[in-house]
Image (cartoon, rainbow, N blue to C red):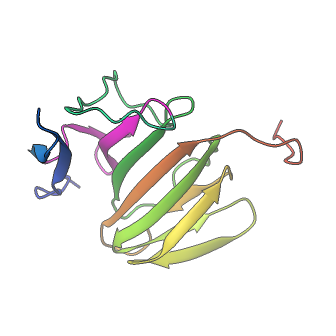
Amino acid sequence: MTPRKKTFRRIVTGHDVNGKAIIISDGPPTHTKLVGGPGGPTFFEVWHTLETPALIHAQPDEPAENGLVLPPPKRGTRIRVIEFPPAPHSLMHRTRTVDYGIVLEGEITLVLDDVETTIQAGDIVIQNGTNHAWANRSGKVCRMAFMLIDGEFTNEIVQPK
């Protein structure tokens, strides 16, 4: 399955020399990556910050990065959109992040260690460093937006071996 031709606009704002709000760029995301070959998910890297609180520049440049980096930078954030084609779930994975996942189109099944649930357009998942995978059993592409925030596990969470 090939990625959709129409993606979405990424509008980046900033300030002119007089402090007035302006649009710095308006167009599709510049970094797109098909993961796992044909039939795999397509990642649209939208933006990331290098720290929190985030530094607000008058003319922000897209932070440079080589390749696809899953978690946000240490003490940073990341926003990405992923299009999941119909497919069984990929490998389970876990990151030290708090993730806000919003289903924009379609539906997808969130697979956890011992439970799963299907989420639909408009639903929001808040993942707190959990082991998980995504399974698109719907027969149609599912588009999700993810906001990832760097985190640290507390001592009360048992780390997998």
**Quadrant of the image containing the C terminus:** top right
Question: Which stretch appears magenta?
Answer: 28-51
Q: Residue at x 56, y 29 (%)?
A: 74
For this view, does 21 lie left or right of residue 82? left
Q: Residue at x 43, y 42 (%)?
A: 78
Query: Which of the two residues, 152 or 33, is positioned nearer the viewer here?
Result: 152
For this view, does 113 lie left or right of residue 108? right
For this view, does 152 lie left or right of residue 43? right
Query: Which of the two residues, 108 or 130, is positioned nearer the viewer here?
Result: 130
Q: Is residue 123 visible?
A: yes
Q: Is residue 81 above or below residue 16?
A: below
Residue 102, image x and y in percent?
A: 43, 66
Residue 38, image x and y in percent?
A: 28, 46
Magenta stretch encompasses residue 41: yes
Q: Is residue 43 above or below residue 76?
A: below
Number of callouts in the render? 0
Magenta stretch encompasses residue 101: no
**Quadrant of the image containing the N terminus:** bottom left
Residue 83, image x and y in percent?
A: 32, 57
